[in-house]
Image (cartoon, grey):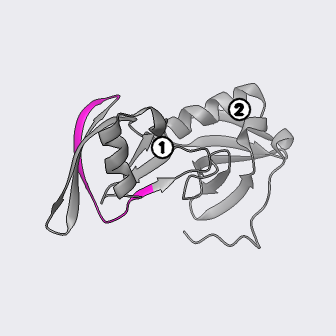
């Protein structure tokens, strides 16, 4: 879904309410108009997680520059849906990275247990707040919230993939 910024409607958070949250979609009220089946998306890379763009099918409903300015109930409902959509295991330790047939095989310990996955090349992105996002070959994301607190070997592995 290509993003055309010239036609994107910037929404005023004081005029937006989340009426209902289902597993991965919302019912949204914007200036009195109600939109069902709305899916929130964050622009990639996730360097500004406070930005949310709302889509209904292929239609862009609009963008919030900072969803945290919504009323408390709307913010809570939106965050509930974002957690489902952007479920990212937290990497606690990198056990190994090895090259296998043009890909890299990772073995990591996450907050959900030990996981193995494959990536292409330099797949670690540094976010503006210092966190790291690792993308596997299927587009799944893993997050390192405090890379400076990892053990030395984990930090070395990650530095090789940035």
Point 38% across, 37% down: residue: 89
Residue 117 magenta-highlighted? yes
Which percent across, then down, holds residue 102?
19, 69
Point 58% across, 72% down: residue: 2
- Viewer-nearest of discs 1 and 2: 1
Observer-nearest residue: 146 or 2?
146
Compared to residue 16, the image places residue 151 above or below, namely above
Distance from Cα at disc 1 to Cα at disc 2: 18 Å
Which percent across, then down, holds residue 121?
32, 66
Looking at the rendering, the stretch of residues picked out in magenta corresponds to 111-124
Point 45% across, 32% down: residue: 149
The N terminus sits in image quarter: bottom right
Quadrant location of residue 61? bottom right
Quadrant location of residue 9? bottom right
| Residue 127 as seen in the image, left or right of residue 33 | left
The C terminus sits in image quarter: bottom left
Q: List the single residue furthest toward the front.
A: 152
Compared to residue 101, the image places residue 157 above or below, namely above
> Which residue does the numbered mark 1 point to in the structure image?
86
> Which residue does the numbered mark 2 point to in the structure image?
74
Compared to residue 15, the image places residue 139 above or below, namely below
Residue 22 shows in this picture: no
Observer-nearest residue: 103 or 152?
152
């Amino acid at each position: 879904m290509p993003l055309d910024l010239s036609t994107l409607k910037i929404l005023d958070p004081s005029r937006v309410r989340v009426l209902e949250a289902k597993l991965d979609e919302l019912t949204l009220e914007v200036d009195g108009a109600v939109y069902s089946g709305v899916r929130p998306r964050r622009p990639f890379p996730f360097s500004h997680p406070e930005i949310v763009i709302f889509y209904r099918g292929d239609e862009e409903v609009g963008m919030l520059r900072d969803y945290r300015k919504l009323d408390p109930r709307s913010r809570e409902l939106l965050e509930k849906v974002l957690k489902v959509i952007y479920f990212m295991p937290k990497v606690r330790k990198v056990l190994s990275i090895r090259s296998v047939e043009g890909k890299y095989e990772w073995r990591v310990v996450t907050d959900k247990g030990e996981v193995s996955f494959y990536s292409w090349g330099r797949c670690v992105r540094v976010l503006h707040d210092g966190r790291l996002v690792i993308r596997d070959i299927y587009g799944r994301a893993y997050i390192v919230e405090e890379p400076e607190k990892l053990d030395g070997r984990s930090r070395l592995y990650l530095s090789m993939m940035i």
